[in-house]
Image (spheres, helix red, strand yellow):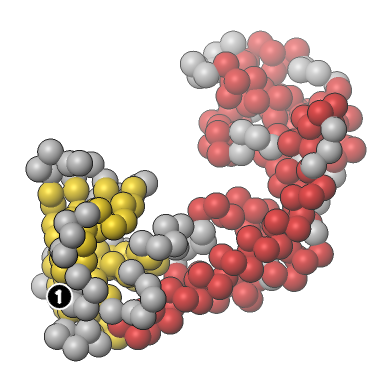
Amino acid sequence: HIDGMILAYCCHPDNGLVCLSTADGFLLLINTCTFELAYICRLKDFILRECVFLKQQNEVLICGVTGDPGQVVILNCLKKDIILRIQLEKARILNISKDSRFLTVFNETGEMNLWSTSQICSSLKSQEECMRSLQAVFQQNKSVLLVGPSLYRKRTIMAEEECLHEDVRKLLNRDRLLGILREFHWFPQKYRVIIWCALLQLPYNRSEYFQLLKMGTPTMVKQRAKQIQIRDGTLRNALVRAWSCLAHWCPVFAHSKFLPNLLFPFVKLLQRNALVTF
């Protein structure tokens, strides 16, 4: 499977599994009785250079230290979208106590952090419940997108409008989101943009936006847009559209030199939703 590119390994104390962490971003869990591959996990954004198993009934949990910047992450190998980051940087070496009750993390700074594995598992479970709640709410709202093909493009443009749904408003209130942020240090990537939209309390003034869109590209914007150096034509057109709408809304924006650079990160992040970008 991996041509010898093993970075780290660990053995489960009870269920006869050995985990191999590979340089090309895989976790291979092998049954030591049969030598068959029991599970395989593809790591998307990082590799693990240290790993240990956490004992948890009916679960296969692995704690690991990533490559640079040295984060400490907890992975559920049976539910691969559940990841908990308990330390954001400078971790170097992991150790787990013989009774599996405590986890030690040695840092590059010489400090040692001591974690309770039961608390870690509780945090992971609460994040899983949070993800399940978010998924349930958004799953309900997906039904409004199941329409005929003639409306598909318009519905796609308005996809982020899900977060205006009353259930989502209640779920994504500021206090609850702050609690998630304090505990997990980040929002699930899948729902991050929608969470931002809820926190910003965007008005989703669709009719006004489409009126501005119909007015086309102002002459000044059209001239200045020739200086925009973006190879991706789709991104470039999206940026010009956003700039044009802002220029119609406030004419002084047509003369702005800094505005394209300010707009670009938002346009790139929100490629599928021009209304949210605006």
Residue 134 location (% of width, % of height): 63, 63
Please indicate, yes or no, whether residue 88 appears anywhere in the rendered image: yes
**At x 25% / y 53%, what residue is drawn?**
37
**At x 31% / y 52%, what residue is drawn?**
40
Front-most of 71 and 250? 71
Q: Inspect the image, locate mark 1, and give the three-letter code of the amino acid beneath it.
A: Asn
Residue 258 location (% of width, % of height): 56, 30
Q: Is residue 155 left or right of residue 103?
A: right
The crowding category of the residue bearing disc 1, from other C-alpha atoms within 10 Å (few below 14, some 14 to 19, many at least 20), is: some
- Classify residue 83 by image quadrant: bottom left
Above or below: residue 94 compared with residue 5: below
- Classify residue 95 by image quadrant: bottom left
Quadrant of image for the N terminus: top left
Front-most of 265 and 59? 59
Quadrant of image for the C terminus: top right
Front-most of 201 and 65? 65
The residue wearing badge 1 is: 95
**At x 27% / y 75%, what residue is drawn?**
54
Q: Is residue 61 left or right of residue 253?
A: left
**At x 55% / y 76%, what residue is drawn?**
179
Label count reads 1
Q: Is residue 165 left or right of residue 54?
A: right
SS of the residue at dot 1? strand
Please indicate, yes or no, whether residue 263 appears anywhere in the rendered image: no
